[in-house]
Image (spheres, rainbow, N blue to C red):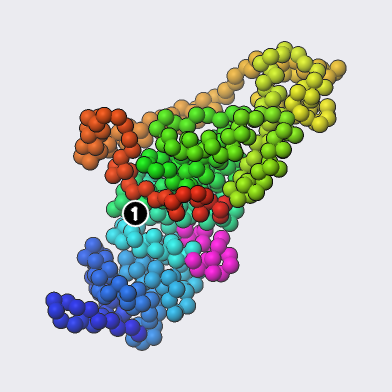
Amino acid sequence: MSTVGASAHGAQAFVSLDDVVTRITTTPPTAQLAQFLRTFAQKETRDAVLASTLGSGQDPLAVLDPVRNTLGYLFILSARLQGSTLPSPPLSAIEDFCSTFEPEQARLAPDRVTLLAKGILRVAEQSANPKYAIRSLASLVARYPPSPSYLTTLHPIFVRVCVATGHYASALPVLSVPITNVDTSVSDLTYNDHLVYHYAGGVALGALKRWREAEEFFEICVSAPAQVPAAIQLEAFKKLALVQLIQYGETVPPPKYTLPALVRIFKNTSYNTFIKNYPSTTAVLRTWVTKEADMLNTDQNTGLVNQAIERAPVWLIKKLTATYLTLGLSDIKKQAGIETVEQCRETILSMIDAGEINGSISADDTVTFADPVPEFSKDQLDRLLVSAQHNSALLAETERALNTSKEYLTKATKAKDDSGWGADEDMYGANSMMGGSGHAPWADEVSFA
């Protein structure tokens, strides 16, 4: 049992874990209880008390109900997971809390929710099997926010675990919901959380070959407002360019509001040489890969580059369709840098099957190209309509929220009156440089297959 001294109006008061549990079980779970749990002792000793046992030697988590006493349970569980002398609670107890806790109570202590998530990750890593954290964190990130559209500190933690363990598909339920709400009273977010979430989300979606969605996530990270570019934004820019090469055969200019300094930095990287030569024959592109092998391994981009190179013949063939109506397979093989006529035939047939080109191959190995005929099924049109209606409703709701925000209207009016344009750091939150300059530290932890 732990007992701690605290000063109250000049008098020395002693608060034990028994006192804390009694307060938890007899006091309504309100902001007042949250304040008590944050201040009943000095910071240096508070978590030590919370991570101890009761005077009887009993585990306080066995006394508290994770639903009825969510707030108190959260403080004690998060303290226990930070490396206390007591054994960590069993995984089943952690999963039970994450799947049953009362969200409204937990939102009274957003900092402890973040601490809990980090503690779950720490224990999972110590067990040499981080994937054990996925189920608990998935429950947390699904149940804690007021709605799935809220970005929280749990989002980057959860998606990073999915990426680090190769469980990319586990992140899809979270990544598939557009983020339209950011509320620091719900979660103690930083600017860096936003960058890491979208970077990690782009990695997960890219690993699943969901290129359009991966492009969107990387672009959000790259174009995030800042006064100085964050290192992780440069890493996102590299992956964004490679994803666009795979998807379009060329890069797309970043949004106009992207920080010009970031664009200049990216253009000075070796990736710009690869982009200028793309698409080209495999031999030419492989020469660049050999030269830049160390850099690609450091950036964890070798897999993406290889996929871009595999797609290069496709884009070379598509360029030929804009010039020729008919062309022999041997000529196509030569111009696309494909090794054999049979490989060229397979490539063209797969492109026809995928709807990438419209054409046919005759018995004498002549390829005839034709303009593509767009075809849409009723189901596709219905899905597009439903998606458009949903996105329209989200935009309308976001616009209503902005129009009622005094802070936004004040800043928008000020920005309109100011000459020129520049990112308002106050408006978007503090910019974390993740170490200042150079390669983003966290970017080393992820890769594409």
User: Given the current orientation, which residue lies at the most extreme top position?
Assistant: 325
Secondary structure of the residue carrying tag 1 is loop
Q: Nearer the viewer, residue 398 or 234?
A: 234
Task: Name which residue type carries label 1.
Answer: Ser
The spot of residue 55 in percent (x, y) is 34, 86
The residue under the point 45% across, 54% down is: 435
Q: Nearer the viewer, residue 93 or 336?
A: 336
Residue 23 to residue 180: above or below: below
Taking the image as shown, residue 64 lies to the left or right of residue 220, namely left
Identify the residue at horizontal 49%, vertical 66% (top origin): 122
x, y percentage for residue 407?
Answer: 22, 41
Q: Residue at x 36, y 42 (%)?
A: 227
Quadrant (top left, top right, bottom left, bottom right) of the N terminus: bottom left
Q: Is residue 63 above or below residue 246?
A: below
Q: Is residue 217 left or right of residue 43?
A: right
Compared with residue 305, is residue 187 higher up or lower down, i.e. above or below? below
Comparing 336 with 131, the one in front is: 336
What range is drawn magenta here? 122-138
- Residue 145 in sight here: no
Q: Which residue is mark 1?
A: 187
**Is residue 65 magenta-colored?**
no
Q: Main secondary structure of the magenta part?
A: helix
User: How many residues crowd around disc 1 within 10 Å: few (fewer than 14), some, or many (20 or more)?
Assistant: many
Which residue is at a point 33% across and 38% down the rendered structure image? 423
Residue closest to the far left:
9
In the image, taking residue 326 as reference, residue 269 lies left or right, namely left
